[in-house]
Amino acid sequence: MTKCHRSRTSRAVRISFILCAPCVVLLTIAGAGAEFAASDAQSGLGRPRATLDLTERQPRRKFIAEHVVGPLECRNCHQAEYEHWKQTKHAGRAFDLLRTQSTAREYAEALGIPLKEIARNSLCVRCHATPRVDEFGRPDVVPGVSCESCHNPAGGATGWLNSHAVYGPSGTRRETETAEHHSQRLAASIAAGKNGTDDLYSLARRCFQCHAVGEEALVNAGHSHGSRNFDFAEMFLSDLRHNFHLAQHVNASVSTLWLQQLHVKPGRTSAGRKRMMLVLGAVAELEVSLQNLSVATDEDGEYFESVADRVIDAFEYLTEDILDELSEVPPSLQRVVDIAQPFYKKIDDGDFSLATDATSCAEAAKAIADVAHKFARSSDGRELSELEEPGSHLP
């Protein structure tokens, strides 16, 4: 088995990565929707296709603060997960930084944010807390990056909170849920905004909406552009690990619900799931970085330079550190490479121009999301068996 590891070497023309606190953009999230219908025929890695169909899109939903119910509602059924989360940096340090770090005041002053609003009603709370609305309709927060920061707001008349664990008519248990109801329930939960076990790519890209900063003014004011070498699989298997639901005493390395074989094809394994985390995390970083680059306005600013550098690194990590280790690249992943490669080449050659390339760059990011969602729904990771199993060194 070939070892796959994260390796990012800086070039003289790149901006060095900076270690940073949790960062700031939590604006939209790709969800369930139209399938990507373009041809998935295999091609050589790095060989551009003649045409790219970018017409079909995953719907994108806003983070609706009014629908946030708070982690105590989740604790009612997920006690062990809640207790694990309470011990993480997401639950504590992320929010504390807004009140204790001197740079928070500097960023607020640079962006014209009143100091009293930094930790309650500012763009900062999108990633350092969970925005919500109090009982009087005023902006408020759940202190810390909580359940709904990652899994999406659950309340509201059309929210997923009250339906995601309803297995059929009153009294129906999970073990007796019909295959038809199982399929409908998962589709309805995703359509209602839930980022969960069955929507792994949305979970991955949600991480990068904070760990790859998409706020130009903030980065130009001195904030880091994102976490250094953030690895979705490693984080998901260590600090974010809370996969207890079917066996509350076992902190499983992958979701016990995903491994259950009730209404899925046999063959799912923990190793396959972890390899999916590795690949989808790399794709999510590439997609979000392209999207962030497309909204830049100043080609001479720190934001443009740092995000362009992140696109370069994300593309090379996906292709050189991961896909090159496979004897046969899955068609969907090859499609991702084909979509991103022209932009990678333009950026690497110094030919990328916001005036001519920004719109097509955003379109490419959306197309990558479509492909990745399809791959995440259809694959169990068996075609990735040549990759090293992520997190094998973790307890």
Image (tube, helix red, strand yellow):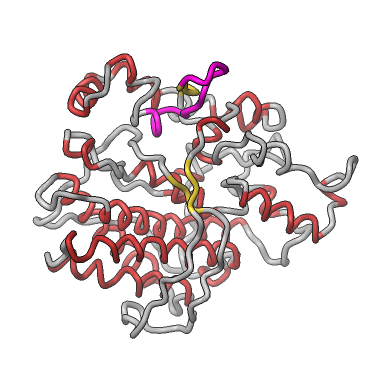
Image location (x, y in percent) of residue 69 = 60, 28
Residue 203 versus residue 329: which sits nearer the camera? 203
Whole-percent x and y of residue 272?
57, 61
Q: Residue at x 24, y 60 (%)?
A: 358
The residue lying at 78 percent from left, 43 percent from top is 166
Which picture quadrant has residue 171? top right
349 left or right of 48 in image: left
What is the x, y in percent for residue 303? 19, 46
- Residue at the location (33% across, 17% down)? 99
* Residue 127 is one of the magenta-drawn residues: yes
Please tell me in which quadrant of the rendered image residue 322 appears.
bottom left
| 36 on left or right of 170 | left
**Residue 275 visible in the snapshot:** no
Is residue 390 shown in magenta?
A: no
Q: How many marks?
A: 0
Which residue is painted at 45% across and 83% down in the image?
A: 42
Magenta region, residue range: 125-138
Residue 125 visible in rendering: yes
